[in-house]
Image (cartoon, rainbow, N blue to C red):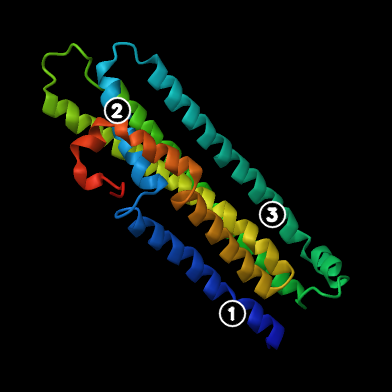
Amino acid sequence: MLNWAEIIDLVVLIPFLAVWIGYVIFARRAAKCRESLSSVLIILRIDWMRHLLERDNRILDAALMGNIEKNMSFFASTTLLIIAGSLTALTNAKSIHELTSLIPWVWPHTITMVQIKVVTIICILIYAFFKFTWALRQYGFASVMIGAAPNSDDERATPEMKKVFSVNAGKLIDQAGHNFNNGMRAYYFALAVVGWFIHPLLFLAFALIVVRILYQREFKSRSLKTLVDGLSMSQYYLDNEVLNFKKD
């Protein structure tokens, strides 16, 4: 039979998931009608693919793709190591419980609750791993598209064909970027779970702080302002006024 402390400990998972899923939905919808890292980067990625078609030497593009894939691979492999460490912590749940029980202001919990909290972190990390590996595969698909791109002097490649290629290749890279971003968000929210070992309210407070940080970086950061200012050189941006996020 669950006691009142365990019930409260379990109930806080609901608002935690609501905050996480709610922010993901909000960010996806907001990016369609206002400037954000997602809405700006897809424009620049499409422009990148358009300029790629104009270059005879594409070593730079291959190097950029290789560097991005290396970063993806690093996060994917690191996530596996963290999962392994979390599994070790799961087997030592009794020790974690004894350690936290010595601190008087820590929320009372049982060994079972400690195991549930560790398993929650493991589940989040597994989700992140799948996102990172899928993003890695999508960048691989984009590399194949770049390899199949027509040469700049190919007379059979019409302007319309080149436009379709640049848009589709840019969107494919953007999809990979979204999956990588979702994996990074999972890392942030996994860190919020650490507060759960101390107090349920601290757990929710950490989740809200994570949302605040994510929102600030995706919609209000200086990096975003710099990227938006740089859109004045983007031909795709200038040709599609519907994408114009700048305020009059």
The amino acid beneath tag 1 is Val
Occupied quadrant, residue 119 = bottom right
The amino acid beneath tag 2 is Met
Q: Where's residue 183, x and y in %? A: 50, 49
Residue with the mark numbered 1: 11
Instruction: Give the tally of numbered discs.
Output: 3
Q: Where's residue 201, x and y in %? A: 66, 74
Occupied quadrant, residue 11 = bottom right
Q: Nearer the viewer, mark 3 or mark 1?
A: 1
* Quarter that holds the N terminus: bottom right
- Residue 127 shows in the view: no
Most distant residue in the right direction: 102
Q: Going from the N terminus, do you reach mark 1 or mark 2 first?
A: 1
Q: What element carries label 1?
A: helix
Residue with the mark numbered 3: 86
The amino acid beneath tag 3 is Ser
Q: Where's residue 223, x and y in %? A: 48, 40
* Point 43% across, 42% down: residue: 225
